[in-house]
Image (cartoon, helix red, strand yellow):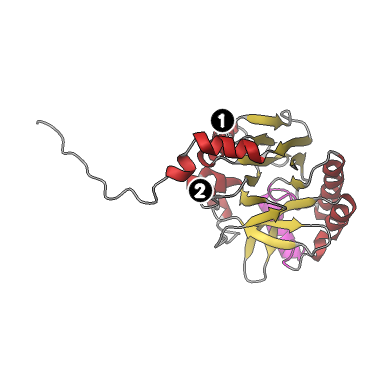
Amino acid sequence: MLRVAAVQAEALPGEVDRNLASAADWVRRAARRGAGVVVFPEAFTTGYDEAAFADLLHTGHLPGIDLAWAAPVQAAVEDGGVTAVLNSPLDHGTHRTLSSVVLRPGERPVAAYAKQHLYASERAFFTPGECGASLMTGERELALSVCYDANFPEHAAAAAGADVYLNSGAYFPGGEHRRDLHYAARALDNGVYVVFAGLLGAPYGFIGGSAVFDPEGRIIDRVPPGTEGLAVADIDPERIAEVRGTQRMWADRRPGLGERHRLAPVGP
C-alpha cells in the first residue's frame, strides 16, 4: 500500500541553497516514516516571495530548467528510496513557470507539471502550463497540481481515473476556510485522496494546512497550525473503490449541459 507524506515547513525567501538542504532533510524524514511519495509546498526552493523571484532572476540564481540545482534533494531521494514532488519557479530562458519537479530513485529529475491557473499577481512573472500531468507509482496514479489549480473543479475532473490528487500550495492568512473547502470538495467530487502541502511563514505569514483528505473529503492526518511537520497517510485502493461505488459524481458528470434558458420577469 502506498504511503504519502505532505510537508508543512517554512522556506526562506531567496535562500535557494538553504531551502534545498531543508528539502533534502524532509525527504529523509518522510522516508523514515515509510512514505513512498513526499510532496512539498509551493515555491519551496525559493520561498513564495515576488521580490525574491525578481531578485533571483536578475542575479541569475532562479532555478533553471536543467535541474542541476536539484542534486541535494536527488541524493536524499536515492538514500531514502522515496519519490519527491518539489515545487519551484523555473527559468526556461524565454519564460518562467511554477513547476512540480519529480525526483525518483535511479532517474533524472523531471519538470513534470507547470501550474495552469495563475493568480493575478503571478501573471506578470510566470507563464501558465498547457497540459495536465500524472505520476505513476506502482499501480497508483497521482495527479499533479499547484495551489490555485485546486480552486477549479474541472482541473481535478480532468484527472479522472487518478487515485490521488497532489497539490503544492501557499495560503495567505484568512484563507483557512476556502483552503479546506476546496480540497475536501475535490476529494469527494472525484473519489480521490487529496494530498495538500502548505507553506508556512515568511514573508506573508503563510498558514500551512498540510493534510491528507480521504475520498469522501474527510481529513485523515493534518499538521497542526503554525508548526512544521508531515501529514502522513496510506492510500487504500479499496476505500477509493467503495466511495466511487456510492458517490457517483465522477462517473455521472455530464460534459455539456446545453443552452441556458432564462424566464422573463413576471408582471410589471
The kind of residue tagged 2 is Ala
Image side of residue 117 versus residue 74, left or right: left
Residue 28: where, in percent of width, then height? 87, 45
The answer to whether the residue labelled 1 contacts the one labelled 2, judged by CB atoms less than 8 Å apart, is: no
85, 158: nearer the viewer: 158
Which residue in the structure is indicated by mark 1?
Answer: 177
Q: Which mark is residue 157?
A: 2
236, 38: nearer the viewer: 236
Give SS at disc 2. helix
Q: Is residue 266 above or below residue 253?
A: above
> Is residue 111 rendered magenta in the image?
no
Q: Residue furthest right?
A: 79
Mark before the other along the chain sequence, 1 or 2: 2
For the question of whether residue 66 can be seen, the reply is yes
Q: Residue furthest bottom?
A: 94
For the question of whether residue 208 can be seen, the reply is no
Residue 166: where, in percent of width, then height? 65, 46
Mark in front: 1 vs 2: 2
- The part of the chain drawn in magenta is 42-65
Give SS at disc 1. helix
